[in-house]
Image (tube, helix red, strand yellow):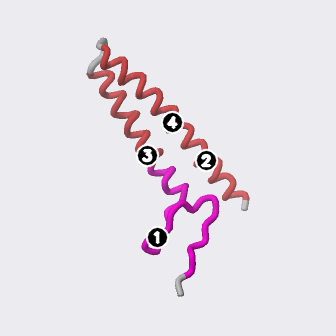
């Protein structure tokens, strides 16, 4: 008889015997945001002085803020883990 996987607040998914946690997903999203920030910054410079350049510059700032908030959460989880 199969047992149901045990979940806590960090476990988001368990398929095929592999558990993917919220931390795993957050790390992936953080890396994606950093990549978007880099790309949008590059595009804003490529199209500097145009409407597209302004849109890319604004997107870079928003993605950078998103990446920073994800990083802050990851750091807080790391600090909590170190306290245990």
- Say if the magenta span includes residue 39: no
Residue at image point 60% right, 42% down: 72
Question: What residue did someone put label 3 on?
Answer: 31
Q: Secondary structure at mark 2?
A: helix
Q: Give neighbour class at mark 4: few <14, some 14-19, many 20+ (Cα, 10 Å).
A: some
Nearer to us of marks 2 and 4 is 4
Residue at image point 54% right, 60% down: 12
66 above or below 25? above
Q: CA distance from mark 3 to mark 2?
A: 14 Å
Nearer to us of marks 1 and 3 is 1
Q: Secondary structure at mark 4?
A: helix
Question: What residue did someone put label 2 on?
Answer: 75
82 above or below 32? below
41 above or below 70? above
What is the quadrant of residue 60 in the picture? Answer: top left
Q: Position of residue 48 (x, y in %)?
A: 30, 16
Disc nearer the start of the sequence (1/4): 1
Residue 6 marker: none
Question: What residue did someone put label 4 on?
Answer: 66
Where the C terminus falls, by quadrant?
A: bottom right
Horizontal side of 45 relative to 76 (left or right) equals left
Residues drawn in magenta: 3-28
Q: CA distance from mark 1 to mark 3?
A: 21 Å
- Say if the magenta span includes residue 18: yes
Q: Position of residue 15 (x, y in %)?
A: 45, 69
Disc nearer the start of the sequence (4/3): 3
């Amino acid at each position: 008889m199969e047992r149901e996987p045990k979940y806590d607040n960090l476990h988001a998914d368990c398929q095929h015997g592999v558990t993917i946690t919220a931390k795993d997903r957050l790390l992936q999203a953080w890396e994606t945001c950093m990549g978007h920030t880099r790309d949008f910054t590059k595009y804003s410079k490529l199209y500097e002085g145009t409407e597209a350049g302004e849109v890319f510059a604004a997107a870079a700032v928003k993605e950078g803020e998103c990446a920073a908030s994800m990083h802050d959460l990851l750091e807080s989880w790391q600090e909590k883990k170190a306290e245990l």
